[in-house]
Amino acid sequence: QVQLQQSGRGLVKPSQTLSLTCAISGDSLASHTAAWNWIRQSPSRGLEWLGRTYFRSKWFNEYSPSVRGRITVNPDTSKNQFSLQLSSVTPEDTAVYYCARGVGALFDSWGQGTLVTVSS
Amino acid sequence: QTVVTQEPSLSVSPGGTVTLTCGLNSGSVSSGNYPSWYQQTPGQTPRALIYTTNSRASGVPDRFSGSILGNKAALTVTGAQADDESDYYCALYVGGGVHWVFGGGTKLTVL
């Protein structure tokens, strides 16, 4: 059974970079059938898909237009984990951030969630 | 901008049947939007229920079923139980770089 364990700071100052990591157990980051996603949830924006990374003979990254230009999702095969970096954050980026495995059309496994607050 | 619409709240009696819907502001929902459904209780992580319109995720009881009803995706709960009281979210694949869009959720009350 796949498990996703998130880590990272819960408080980020405005204009700085939010960084989170998602460690995978029970599956391989380089799986040819899975994609590794970041999703956030806030009262004002609801659930919002942010981006993903996946391997299909080479690595692909795809990002939502709402955060494109500020987001980077990086795979780390040596540690079987992937990361999220979101730059130039504002209070509107305050949310619970989740990593999630996507298999086909389903986000079937989720990390525990990390509340990230953007505040000075 | 793509908006996915859901009923803000619904209620059902214990043992009753309720249908939640998931629509698109830009038109009809089809199987090509690969509708999926998630259950979330307060403070918990979303739990996968249904994918590709009507396939149940692992371990999901068969009282949960998915379909396309008219121009919307639908989640039907048959024989509702007290612990079905949760928030339910649908997600649609819309492509075009946006990929996945979630609905605002339906708060289901069992009373």
Image (tube, coloured by chain):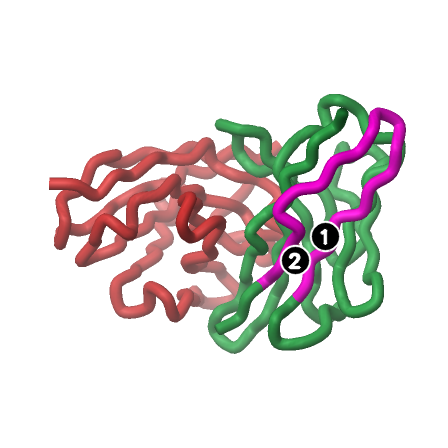
Chain colours: A red, B green
Q: Is residue A48 above or below residue A63?
A: above
Is B98 situated left or right of B17 in this image?
Answer: left
Specify whether disc 1 shares its chain with disc 2: no
Q: Is residue A111 visible?
A: yes
Q: Is residue B108 magenta?
A: no
Of helix, strand and loop, which one carries label 1? strand
In depth, the one of B94 and B81 nearer the eye is B81
The image quadrant that residue A78 belongs to is top left
Q: Nearer the viewer, residue A58 or A87?
A: A87
In magenta segment, residue B9: yes
Residues marked 1 and 2 touching at CB (< 8 Å): yes
Give the residue pinned by disc 2.
A105
Three-letter code, disc 2: Ala
Residue B60: name its quadrant: top right
The location of residue B1, given as percent across then percent down, is 48, 73
Dominant SS of magenta comes to strand
Expressed as whole percent of the image width and height from the top left, the position of residue B25 reads 61, 71
| Mark 2 nearby-residue class (10 Å; few <14, some 14–19, many ≥20) | some
Q: Which residue is mark 1?
A: B51
Measuring 18% from the left and 51% from the top, which residue is drawn there?
Answer: A17
Q: Quadrant of the C terminus of chain B?
A: top right
Against A72, residue A28 (above or below) is above
Indicate the amino acid at tag 1: Tyr
The CA span between labels 1 and 2 is 6 Å
Question: Mark 1 Cα within 10 Å, few/some/many (few <14, many 20+)?
Answer: many
- Residue appearing at x 73%, y 54% in the figure: B21
Residue A101, given in percent of the width and then of the height, sits at 54, 47
Q: Please report the bounds of the magenta region as a residue range.
A: B4-23
| Residue A37: image tag | none
